[in-house]
Image (tube, helix red, strand yellow):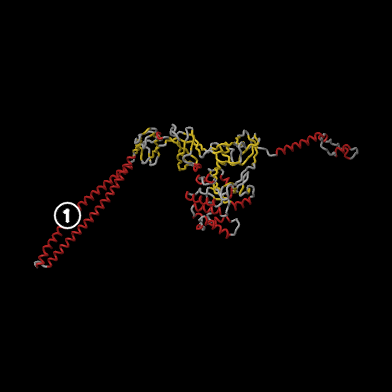
Amino acid sequence: MNSPTLPDPIAGAAADTVQRGTAMDRALPPPRWRRTPMLAALATAAVFGLALLLAWQRQPQLQTVRAAQLAPVRAGLFRDELPLRARAEPIRSVQLDAVEAGLVESVQARDGDRVEVGAPLYRLRSPEQEQLLMQRGAEVAQQMANVSAQRSAQATSLAQNRRELARLQAEQQQAEADYGRLAPLAAAGFVSAAALEQARRQQALATQLLEQARQDQRIEADIHAQSLAEMARAVDGLQHGLRLLQEARARLQQTAPIAGQLSGFTLQVGASVRPGDRLGRIDDPAGGMQLAAEVDEYYLPRLRAGQLATSADGPLSLVQTLPQVQGGKVRVLLRWSGPPPALQPGQAVELRLQLSRPAPALLLPDGPGVQTRLYVLHGRELRRRAVRLGRRAAGQVEVLGGLAAGEQVLLSQPPPTPKGLPCHDRTEATEQTPSRRYRGNHGPGRDRPADRSRRIRRHHRPSGCGKSTLLGLLGLLDRPSGGRYLLQGEDVARKSDRELAAIRRGRIGFVFQSFNLVDEMTVQDNVKLALRYGNGSDRQQRARVAEVLDRLGLAHRAGHHPSQLSGGQQQRVAIARAIAARPALLLADEPTGNLDSAHGREVMQLLRELNDEGTTLVMVTHSAEHAAQAARSVRLLDGRILVDAQAEHWA
């Protein structure tokens, strides 16, 4: 169809036969495209096609995935198994620790030797100990000489006392005889009464002196006996110390406590040894072998004696979990149910520890794309979907909701600029809301909003796993890039900054690891900060602050400053500030991280009470002990949810 054209005035003037003053000017010929209607039509069609092309290019293009790795959701048994790499070690093994200090004088055994009980291993030399031994021996000899001298002096004193007592007895007897002879003579008038009285006084004096001498000798004998007993005890103490030194000198010669093979024994002559130094060990292979493995402390609450494990060398069972946690790991010991295989100490064994019995479940192979928001195949398109995932073990992921058996899921992540399989980047209607089902006073199976859940949710994770992002989203400090965030049934993800501030002020409380108290303010003023921008008069706010402080046992500290409080008291003040506005959701970021164990338990008990009273609590923690108390435990790593499980005692 040809496009219509308008008459050209220049061309019309050229065709006019009327002569004017401008007739001497030569008229220009019409343009080429004006002379050809077909060319004009083609130009119009080209412009229209270009417009259509631009409009088509502006339409949203689907991302593509090259060499997509897909896997179907299948029904099967979820095996809650923990793969471990264990080391074989003898059941009977004795560590050789130095008990005495000294220099190695001689080494009588080598690493790898087979030794018998009592076999010499090495000998130490300790000049200080030898000097102390000689000094203590001299003290014992001196004290024993003192005892001998004391006993000799006592014997001499006793002999002298006996002679003195014999003399006094003789004098007393002579006085009695004189008085007995004069008494009848005085009665007959041959002796005067004065002479008789003198004889009587001499008799009484002799008797008194004899009794006094006997009493003095008894006291002196008791004193001598007590002195000798004390000196004997001193000698016994010195002799006991001397025996200990002699035993310590004997321990300078170390012998094998058990029979077995010497391992890790690299002692050299001239080396310095201190008490507690680990010098090696003696393994007794005849006592059997066991396996020792290290397990992440996250699994500590789930480890129980008697749990089964499988290996290429036969079934095993867990016999002991050592309570010490070192470097985030706990040590477990496993033994074979039957005769142990022939293994060398230190040999590695691959095994799988069964944490719970296999249970029917929907399963997915584990992969980088298997997250709570993953891609599901629909025809030739991949559509993003929010799902609920449970435990991960042995390369399998437990599917709790959002997927059906047979659906194909993308295991690998789609690249930013992919080419190949089309991929929709949108969220389907299967995205889950934060509401949960529970059993409680409201009857079984009723839905309850997340903010009234009366459950504790713990996020147990290492550093750098996305915790700050998660808390920022939950606390409405950051905005999600997609999906929905339902708080008390209301989608708050797209609200304005003013609306978010109002929600934070009235519904959300924050508890920080470092307390974040204002040092210049009193406890009362710190708590009142949470009410400053809320409704209510100053009198009402003060009443609420007093109520909260009394609830947390801090009423007597209202006028104190944070620097005058202990760590546990400062964290309680931070909790009081967080709950002053009666929030429905309490976010706690490592609330016990800066506290000792006693204050940590105190804060945890307080948070549990608040949770029992109806406050929803989301707490981030490194502690496996605290995570074990949660109704729901979510473990994060590198921005991914590794485990999202409900505790059995809350089911």
Q: Find residue 247 and report its image quarter.
A: top left
Give the position of the N terminus as an image quadrant: top right
Report the residue that reaches farthest toward the right. 18
Report the residue that reaches farthest toward the front. 443
Give the position of the C terminus as an image quadrant: top right
Side of 113 where 485 appears, left or right: right
The residue where tag 1 is placed is: 163
Which of 414 and 271 lies nearest the eye of the viewer? 414
Identity of the residue drawn at 49% across and 35% down: 310
Which of 33 and 203 lies nearest the eye of the viewer? 203
Q: How many numbered badges does the structure rendering display?
A: 1
Report the residue that reaches farthest toward the top. 342
Side of 110 where 428 appears, left or right: right
- Dot 1 surroundings within 10 Å: few (below 14), some, or many (20 or more)? few
Side of 459 where 93 appears, left or right: left
Q: Secondary structure at mark 1?
A: helix
Q: Find residue 535 and report its image quarter.
A: bottom right
Q: Is residue 105 above or below residue 152?
A: above
Q: Is residue 586 visible?
A: no
Q: Find residue 270 and report its image quarter.
A: top left
**Horizontal and vertical percent position of residue 256:** 36, 36
**Horizontal and vertical percent position of residue 238:** 29, 47
**Horizontal and vertical percent position of residue 276:** 39, 41
Which of 629 and 478 lies nearest the eye of the viewer? 629
Please name the amino acid that badge 1 sits on. Arg
**Horizontal and vertical percent position of residue 443:** 58, 49
Q: Is residue 208 visible?
A: yes
